Image: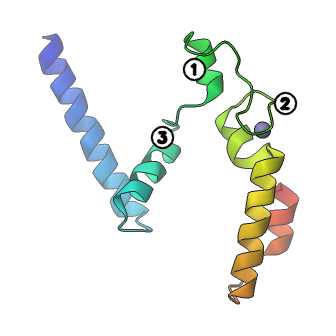
Amino acid sequence: MWQKQGIREQHYVEREFTDCIKQHRVTSDTKLREFQFKLLNRYLVTNDFLNKIGVLTSPACSFCGKENESLEHILISCHYAKDFWAQVIKWLCNLKVNVNSHAWNAGL
Ligand SMILES: [Zn+2]
């Protein structure tokens, strides 16, 4: 029963993965697609999670060490993430890509 349920669940996850990639395909790179799937499904492992399950003794951010390393912190609110996104915006602007900097700056 457990094995049958596990296989059914695995098929469901694989179908969800395929549907998700088809809807939001941005790259053919397998690693990027895997990262996108994990991000969209909040499946990325953070120090906050590893601390909760007892793998790490501290939930602190791997980069700044000041806040708990949640998905939101490591991708948006950490000052290292903000610097990264600022560099990405600068790079895109240099390539003449139309970036609504006001919306980005408001979030960053
Ligand atoms: Zn941080």
Disc 1 + disc 2, Cβ < 8 Å:
no
Residue 69 horizontal/vertical position (percent): 70, 31
The answer to whether one can see residue 54 in this image is: yes
User: What is the C-alpha distance between the residues marked 1 and 2?
Assistant: 17 Å
Q: Which residue is mark 3?
A: 41
Nearest the viewer among 27 and 41 is: 27
Give the image's coloring scheme. rainbow
Q: Is residue 105 above or below residue 50?
A: below
Which residue appears at 86% of the width and 64% of the height? 105
Residue 58: which disc? none
Chain-order first, disc 3 or disc 1: 3
Q: Is residue 26 above or below residue 5?
A: below
Q: Is residue 13 above or below residue 88?
A: above
Q: Quadrant of residue 82?
A: bottom right
Q: Callout 2: helix, strand or loop?
A: loop
Residue type at numbered disc 1: Leu
Chain-order first, disc 3 or disc 2: 3
Chain-order first, disc 1 or disc 2: 1
Q: Callout 3: helix, strand or loop?
A: loop
Q: Is mark 2 within 8 Å of ligand 1?
A: yes
Q: Which residue is mark 2?
A: 66
Residue type at numbered disc 2: Lys
Residue 42 horizontal/vertical position (percent): 53, 37
Residue 83 horizontal/vertical position (percent): 80, 58
* Tag count: 3
Q: Callout 1: helix, strand or loop?
A: helix
User: With 20 as the anchor, is 75 left or right in this view?
Assistant: right
User: What is the C-alpha distance between the residues marked 3 and 1?
Assistant: 17 Å
User: With 82 as the anchor, is 53 left or right in this view?
Assistant: left
The answer to whether one can see residue 99 in this image is: no
Q: Which residue is mark 1?
A: 50
Residue type at numbered disc 3: Asn
